[in-house]
Amino acid sequence: MYIIKVKGIAKIPDYVQLRDEKFTLLAYFRVDRPDKSLEKLGFGDKQEKIMSFINELPFGQVTKLDI
């Protein structure tokens, strides 16, 4: 799975995109509200690990996330 952190501008908040190996969009959620999106994908139990990774991730960088 790949992860991209997108910087928001003005009133638009920061977002995160989760994409699969074929780069198909799996989830698109606000950095401050990941709960429902991660649960839908079945990653509710790994939310803390994923969010700590996201918080350290620079904006605009595509990074492979191994879960």
Image (spheres, rainbow, N blue to C red):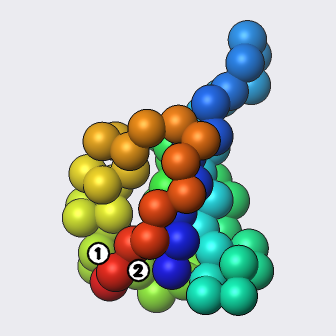
The x, y position of residue 9, in whole percent, is 72, 18
Q: Which residue sits at x=53%, y=37%?
A: 59
Residue 11 placement: quadrant: top right
Q: Nearer the viewer, residue 39 or 24?
A: 24
Residue 54 got which mark?
A: none
- Residue 13 drawn above or below residue 29: above
Residue type at numbered disc 2: Phe
The x, y position of residue 26, in whole percent, is 67, 77
Q: Are marks 1 and 2 in contact (CB under 8 Å)?
A: yes
* Tag 2 secondary structure: loop
- Residue 59 drawn above or below residue 43: above
Q: Is 24 left or right of 47, judged from the image as shown?
A: right
The x, y position of residue 12, in whole percent, is 74, 25
**Label 2 environment density (alpha carbons within 10 Å; few <14, some 14–19, many ≥20):** some
Residue type at numbered disc 1: Lys
* Tag 1 secondary structure: helix
Q: Nearer the viewer, residue 47 or 65?
A: 65
Q: Which residue sits at x=29%, y=75%?
A: 46
Q: Nearer the viewer, residue 18 or 32?
A: 18
The reply to whether residue 30 is in sight is: no
Q: Count the labels in the image.
A: 2
Residue 64 placement: quadrant: bottom left
- Residue 16 drawn above or below residue 6: below
Query: Which image quadrant: the C terminus?
Result: bottom left
Alpha carbon separation for disc pair 1 and 2 = 5 Å
Q: Which residue is mark 2?
A: 43
Q: Which residue is mark 1?
A: 46
